[in-house]
Image (cartoon, grey):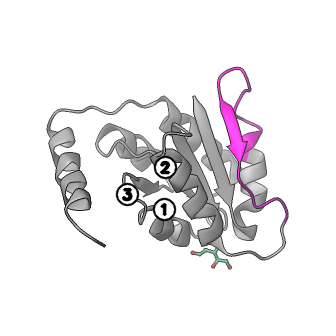
Amino acid sequence: MKIAVGSDHAGFELKEHIKGILPAGEYDVTDVGTHSPESVDYPDFGLEVARRVAAGEADRGILICGTGIGMSIAANKVRGIRAALVCDLYTAAQSRRHNDANVLVLAGRVTGKGLAEEIVKTWLSTEFEGGRHLGRLKKIEAFEKNTDR
Ligand code: RB5
């Protein structure tokens, strides 16, 4: 599975940690930055990861900023992106089962490394259930296609 990861300065440390738990044999990880704790703007990295996922250059994306809110707002502006801000294991699983989330957003200033690891593992290993949930996603997709936003 190809995964694009990105963060701002507030998510940098957690991004580095999360990369370390994604085994190279199983995941092909591309880090779009940021590459240091120097202050940067989260949209530069959130939009790039989202663009890659929407274009099919990556299967999934993982984004991290301080609260996860800015990255969520940015990523969800990109057509075809279903970015889920997740702070617990239940929503990690549900964001896959019910929402087919293709981008996971973590909060580097809220969620500790241990919980973040479990969230990532759960999110990557949980399948979309389809069925009635697919119909709901199709409504969002139709809105995206028929609007000039
Ligand atoms: C950076 O200070 C902070 O605003 C950013 O990481 C994020 O939390 C924005 O939503």
Residue 124 locus on image (x, y percent): 52, 34
Question: Looking at numbered disc 3 in the image, what kind of residue is underneath it?
Answer: Arg
Tell me: residue 91, above or below residue 78.
above
Query: Mark 3 falls on what kind of element?
Result: loop
Q: Which region shows up in magenta?
A: 18-36
Question: Looking at numbered disc 2 in the image, what kind of residue is underneath it?
Answer: Val
Does the magenta-highlighted stretch encompass residue 70?
A: no
Q: Label for residue 119?
A: none
Q: Label for residue 75?
A: 1
Is residue 10 in view? yes
Disc 1 to disc 2, C-alpha distance: 8 Å
Q: Main secondary structure of the magenta part?
A: loop
Rendering quadrant holding ligand 1: bottom right
Query: Mark 1 falls on what kind of element?
Result: helix
Q: Nearer the viewer, residue 11 or 76?
A: 76
Q: Label for residue 103?
A: 2
Residue 26 locus on image (x, y percent): 65, 22
Q: Are marks 1 and 2 in contact (CB under 8 Å)?
A: yes
Is residue 118 in view? no
